[in-house]
Amino acid sequence: MTDEGMYFLGGAFSMYMLAMPLLYHMVEAEDPEEDSLGPLKFIFMWPVVAIEVIYIIFVGEKNDDGTGPN
């Protein structure tokens, strides 16, 4: 891998690690007594959710084939 690729991955990893405490304090569990690990699950999965949202914005919904109202 080239140096540019390593710098990109290092920057992405740094941003992921810096965002974790911020997101942890921004998100709270819907029912803390039932699922107290909700915020922890979110801070580890937020990159996946962000990629899904970006995909839906650019490509569109998976269920919408353009043949009628959904």
Image (tube, rainbow, N blue to C red):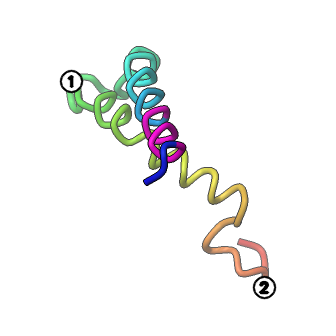
Residue at x 43% of width, y 27% of height = 14
Q: Is residue 64 above or below residue 51?
A: below
Position in image of residue 35 (x %, y %): 23, 32
Q: Are marks 1 and 2 in contact (CB under 8 Å)?
A: no
Task: Report, in whole angstroms, how far the alpha carbon at label 1 lies from the one at label 2.
Answer: 44 Å
Q: Is residue 21 left or right of residue 8?
A: left
Position in image of residue 53 (x %, y %): 60, 50
Residue at the spot of label 2 = 67
> What type of secondary structure mainly makes up the magenta span?
helix
Q: Quadrant of the N terminus?
A: bottom left
Q: Is residue 62 above or below residue 50?
A: below
Residue extending farthest to the bottom is 67
Residue extending farthest to the front is 3
Q: Quadrant of the C terminus?
A: bottom right
Q: Nearer the viewer, residue 40 or 7?
A: 7
Kind of residue indicated by mark 2: Thr
Position in image of residue 4 (x %, y %): 54, 43
